[in-house]
Amino acid sequence: MLGPSLKPEHRTEVRPVIERRKDKRIAEENRVVIESSPPGAPDSCLAINAFTRDLSLTGARIWTDLLFPLNSKLYLTLYLSRSRQIVRIRGTVKWEKECDGGLYEIGVQFQKGIPDTLIALVSHLYGREEAIPTEVSRGRVS
């Protein structure tokens, strides 16, 4: 017999993704060097090459071949290819995820209160070229 089915339809509710971030993320790949002290060895320092997957004024999503535990304190050197700037900033690992091929994805929240670094990131992310220094380092402009 043809006609409407008497079985109740199973509908999947589609919910929009709610963005909790305050700042716009820009998807772009930039080289980043991550410096961190391994647990139990505060006097030694690892330097790991990695890449950003996206970047905002408050943080970055980074691909790396080394897993950094949650709440790890990192010192990042971002090589911003589009604006040809080098930005050095401290950050904290807020989330981590294992990916295929031995890679990891980590979410790093930048330390607040570094005005020169924020100016360099604004310039890079939003295209402003108003006398922004080419390198920003720990409050010193080179």
Image (cartoon, rainbow, N blue to C red):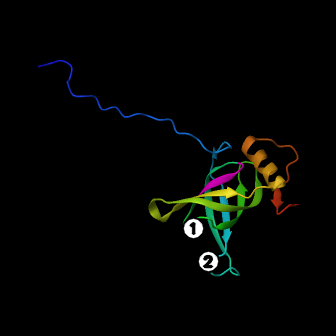
Mark 2 — residue?
39
Tell me if 104 is positioned left or right of 110 in this view: left
Residue farthest toward the top in the current orientation of the protein: 3
- Vertical placement of 69 versus 45: above or below? above
In the image, residue 110 sits, relative to residue 36, either above or below, namely above
Q: x, y percentage for residue 14?
A: 43, 34
Check residue 69 in the rendering and tell me which mark sits there, or answer none.
1
Q: Residue at x 82, y 63 (%)?
A: 138
Res. 16 mark: none
Q: What residue type is disc 2 on?
A: Pro
Left/right placement of residue 120 relative to residue 14 reads right
At which x and y percent is residue 31? 66, 59
For the N terminus, the image quarter is top left
Say which quarter of the image contains residue 93: bottom right
Question: At x 47% / y 59%, what residue is drawn?
Answer: 99
Q: Nearer the viewer, residue 52 or 67?
A: 67
Q: Range of the magenta residues?
A: 57-62
Distance from the alpha carbon under mark 1 to that under mark 2: 10 Å
